[in-house]
Structure formats: structure tokens, C-alpha cells
Image (spheres, helix red, strand yellow):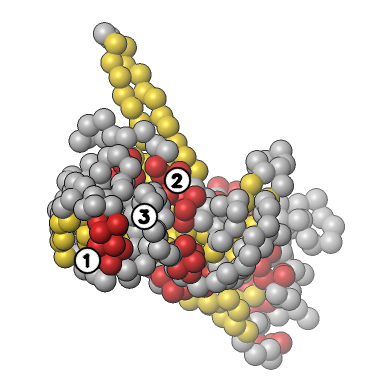
Amino acid sequence: ATCNSSECGGGRGGGEPRDGARTRRKQRAGSAGSGPLTLGRTYKSPRRLVASLLRRNNGRLPLPPPPLLIIHCNSRLDLVGDLNTIIMAPITKLSAAAILLQGAANAFAPSSHANHRSSDTALCSQPQTLYYAAAGAPAVDMDKYNLPLEGCIAEWSAVVVPQSSMQDEGIFLKAKDKELFVDTLQYTLKREGGLGLLLTEIAGGREDGVGITVIEEVLAGGNAEGCGIVPGDSIVSLTVTKTSEDGMNVSEERTGVSTECLGYDATIDAIVSLPPPASAEDEVTVTVKRIRRQPKVSVKLQYPPYLNEPDVSIELFAGENLRRAMLTRGIKLNDKLAERFDSGGSGDCGSDGTCATCVVGVSKGKELLSPMGTQEGQIISKKPRWRMACKAVVGYGMMEGEMTLQVNPRQWEAPPL
């Protein structure tokens, strides 16, 4: 079962499918009558609503304690500081939909003072420790592979994964397009003053709260500004750490919530469930998932001149094994003239790096291949421009570029009789 950005029909329970950003908020919009305002609920025309509530309740607002209400509407921030006073402060580039937050949720809401920064935690982008299996640690700025917000909204999807020995059961984010991948990043931010993140639900409307919520905007002046979080990211977990000292002993208590594949309301509920900040120095670790395109390497293959074969161009993804990638694309590699280092046989050792039948000559783009190992270096020590395709990874360091390879380079030097 699959839950994607335009329809959420998989996972636990049922629910009506819906599509489009902010639709969930619009569905919940309505009149509050004379009852109390509800945490997390969205209301149309908040100024008219507040005036109506004041009129119906003898000049008092029916707010649950503490008396704090934040309303985003028409690019303004309306703050009810007490039961009878409405303070209005301009704020730019906010959604027209209203969002109500109070109590503990205010610790994660944008600060009510425009352009106010409460900490310098996020003055610059926080470095990430990343490693991409065969492609290794990135040697480039991975943000060059990010998608814009519109692309993320179109590509975010989810999949239900059954429990296995390698993974717990659950619903996890994924990208629709196979040429994209989902990265996981962590950022540590101060809680005082709010994170300054505007969230948008792009899939949901279900009774069980399953959906997809993404960051629509990183607000200026918030703690998240400049940390590296970008629009289109989806928050998958938040963790707060409480440190206590007892004489010589220092202990840490961590409390975390998971928000992966939750709709807007369920995401807010999870955030509100975190304990409130105890001091101005309290921090929260925000884990996000981000859609990125897979880096590609364009490879031009040249065959020995005596074959009179035209050059062939193929595209490989960073992290692919060169031999396996070429064979799956129909490229014949086994060289009958290869000097054998295995025990003999068909000329295909199964990628053990001993028969040297898959050697290619690298005319351009050698820096895009993984470093040469000791065994490979010994076998082809007299041919510095050669590489054993079975031991080479393309796009090492998640780099992109162009390569030119000579297939069966021995036959370039001495064509078979």
C-alpha cells in the first residue's frame, strides 16, 4: 500500500483521499460559535471571529489557559495577550490560513516579535556527517542536488513496510521517482523563541492521523534560519534533552517524538507533547528527511578501432559499480587477451578482482572513480590509466561529471588475429 502526496489510501485505517497543499486546513475551517477556541484548529476570518466571540461573550474571549492565541492571516500576526486585548504585529509571507497555537506549542511557534533571534545556534548551516555506502562520504555540497519546494510536494510519497529482521514495521517516506533518493539530516536548535518553521500538509484527511507534512517556509528571524533546513523537508522526529546534576553525577534524560508520515494536526499534537523548555539554553534536535536527485555520471564508451563500432554514451548513477552497471546496460567487457590472475575458467571471476578481464582504459574523468585498492594496484601497476571495472565505483564522493572509457584496452594495443 502506498500513501503519496496527492492521495493517502494506504497504511492503517481508512480515510477520504484528498490532494493539494493546505486542503486539510481548509476542511477544518469554520465558525467557532460561542464555544472555546481549540488548540490546533483552523478558523476562517480570525479578525471577524474574534470580534464575534467578544460580542457573544460579554467582551471576553473563551480561551483555555494560558491566555495566549496566535493567528496567522493575511500576512499579519494577531496576538491575544490577555482576555480583552488584541495586539497586532505585521509579519511577512505567511499563509492565508489561520493557525492557532497556545501553551507548550508556543515553544515551537515563530516568535511574536518579528525578526527577533533568540540564539546564534543557527547563524550558519550546520555540517552533516553523511556516508553513501559505495559512494563514500560526499566530496561536494549535497544541497546542489536538492529539489525546489514544488518538486518536493509533487514527489513526496510513503510506503508501508512490514516488520523484518532488519527493520521495524511502519510507514516511511520515500520519493516517487526512482532517480531521486531520500536523505536524512539532523539539526540542533535552541527552543527559546521558537523554531520559526511554517508547516503545510500535503497528504492526510484520515482518522488515524497518517499523512505527509512538509516545511513550507523557514521564517526570517527564527532559530531555524540559516541552519540548513530548507522548504520541502519533512520533519520525522524531534528530541529534547534534559540535563540534571546530583553532586558529581551528571545525567541526561532524552524525550523524543516521531512525526514521520503524520498529517498536520497529528504533527502539531506530537510537538505539543514534548516537555516545555526549562531554560533559555534548552535545545531540540530536529531530524528531517529531504528529497534529492541522484548524481549522474555521463560515460562515453569507445571500442577498439578494428571493430569499427561507434561510440556509445550511457548514464550511470553515483555509487554504481562500474562493471555491474556496464553489464546491465549490455556492454560486453570480457577481454580474451586479458592476463589471467585467477585459476582459469570462463574469463569471468565474479567481480573478485583476480582475472583482469574487465579492465577499461580511462581517458577522461579518472577522478570520478573510487580510489584504487592495493590488489588492483599491484595487478595493473604498469598501466596507470587502467582500472578494473569490478573494483571501481562511479561518482565516488557523490560527484557528477563526464568520463571517457576505452573498452578492452589491450585490443587497442594488439588486436586479436
- Using the image as rendered, state which of residue 54 and residue 17 is in the foreground: 54
Quadrant of the rendered structure where residue 121 is?
Answer: top left
Spot occupied by residue 104 in the image (x, y as percentages of width and height): 33, 40
Q: CA distance from mark 1 to mark 3?
A: 24 Å
Q: Residues within 10 Å of mark 3 (few under 14, many from 20)?
A: some
As drawn, 379 above or below 188: below
Can you tell which quarter of the image residue 67 is in?
top left
Front residue of 164 and 267: 267
Q: Secondary structure at mark 3?
A: loop
Instruction: Report the mark closest to the observer, 3 or 2.
Output: 3
Furthest-right residue in this view: 345
On the image, the x and y values in percent for residue 204 come to 55, 61
The answer to which quarter of the image holds residue 114 is bottom left
Q: Residue 303, relative to residue 294: is it above or below?
A: below
How far apart marks 3 and 2 lie (CA) works out to: 24 Å
| Residue 258 percent across, percent down from the top left | 50, 43
Relative to residue 65, is residue 391 drawn left or right?
right
Q: Is residue 377 visible?
A: no
Q: Are the residues at dot 3 and dot 2 in contact (C-beta closer than 8 Å)?
A: no
* Residue holding disc 3: 34
Name the front one of labels 1 and 3. 3
Residue identified by numbered label 2: 269
Q: Secondary structure at mark 2?
A: helix
Q: Which residue lies under the disc numbered 1?
A: 76
Does residue 3 appear left or right of residue 145 in this picture?
Answer: right
Of the residues shown, which amino acid type is indicated by label 2? Asp
* Dot 3 amino acid type: Ser
Q: Which mark is residue 219?
A: none
Q: Residues within 10 Å of mark 1 (few under 14, many from 20)?
A: some
